[in-house]
Image (cartoon, rainbow, N blue to C red):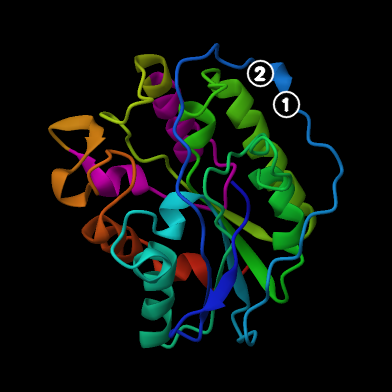
Amino acid sequence: MGRAGVRVGAVTAAIVALTLPLASSGAAEPAAAGDFAVASVHCPAVPPPPRVPAGGSTVVVGASIAAGYRSSQGERTAWPHLLAARLRHDRVPVAIVNDSVSAARLLTDTPGHPCTSALHREGPALAVPGVRTLVLADLINDIQQTPHVYDPRAIEAGLRQFVARAHAHHVRVVAGTIAPYGGFPAYQPAGERTRREVNAFITHSHLFDAVLDFDAVVRDPHQPVRMRPAYDSGDHLHPSDAGQRAMARAVPLRVLWPPAGR
């Protein structure tokens, strides 16, 4: 599944990418930590915001959750679009550019669709006019899709590479923790262990300039491997409208417009 078209929403601070549904997976052998090498490729440019405000641009590098798959109005009810509305309401001068591609992984491209991995899309994201922050979200697909990546060290190595490249361009990286996916057809206990270990790395490694704990926001306190029923769209992976709203509310605006430094 490739990158879809982009349209400008009603909120002038946001450009939101429309994407296709997330591809689920069946059983397969998990991938090992040494299987991933990012080749030098020329990827399409990310459409810029209509204007670059004083606080610059924040680019969301995500997948189908950030694109609003299974929410009532797609991208218009996805958390990046709702976050842009918050920024506008609170007069925070930051543009949101949503470069979310359905079925996208961190480490590898979707077969047949080059430039879908976050590592490949990072270059075009860093070229967005006024970019100051990248928000890296929706990291579940390396785990739940085939080939499954059940070695957290492989994902952590990809995260380090993503951050190092952004920091070399003096761009901040904010990471979202991985929301639970218990009940989804591709769920496996090994994948759950990987999800938790990667979340612990995101939260405690001090690699990132800030962390958005989406896992804590949407998980069911009684069954932490699952989303809260009120936040579950029904497939146990993608949030409902209520879940998307909760994610948007959970983003501290100061994360996107820090007072000084990175």
Residue 48 image-quadrant placement: bottom right
Q: Residue at x 44, y 76 (%)?
A: 84
Residue 41: % across, % down: 85, 46
Mark 2 vs 1: CB contact within 8 A: yes
Residue 160 part of the magenta-drawn span:
no
| Magenta residue span | 193-220
Q: Quadrant of the C terminus?
A: bottom right
How many badges with numbers are in the image? 2
Q: Which residue bears the numbered disc 2?
A: 33
* Residue 258 shows up from this direction: no
Residue 196 part of the magenta-drawn span:
yes
Q: Which residue bears the numbered disc 1?
A: 36
Q: Residue at x 50, y 86 (%)?
A: 12
Residue 179: % across, % down: 35, 41
Q: From mark 2 to mark 1, how far is it between C-alphas?
A: 7 Å
Helix, strand or loop under label 1: loop
Picture layout, residue 152 above or below residue 40: above
Q: Nearer the viewer, residue 115 or 38?
A: 115
In the image, taking residue 136 as reference, residue 116 lies left or right, namely right
Q: Residue at x 48, y 30 (%)?
A: 198
Residue 21: % across, % down: 45, 48
Residue 110 image-quadrant placement: top right
Q: Nearer the viewer, residue 220 or 141?
A: 141
What amino acid is labelled 2 in the image? Ala
* Residue 108 shows up from this direction: yes
By secondary structure, the bulk of the magenta-drawn segment is best described as helix
Neighbours of disc 2 within 10 Å: few (<14), some (14-19), many (20+) = some
In the image, taking residue 24 as reference, residue 155 lies left or right, namely right
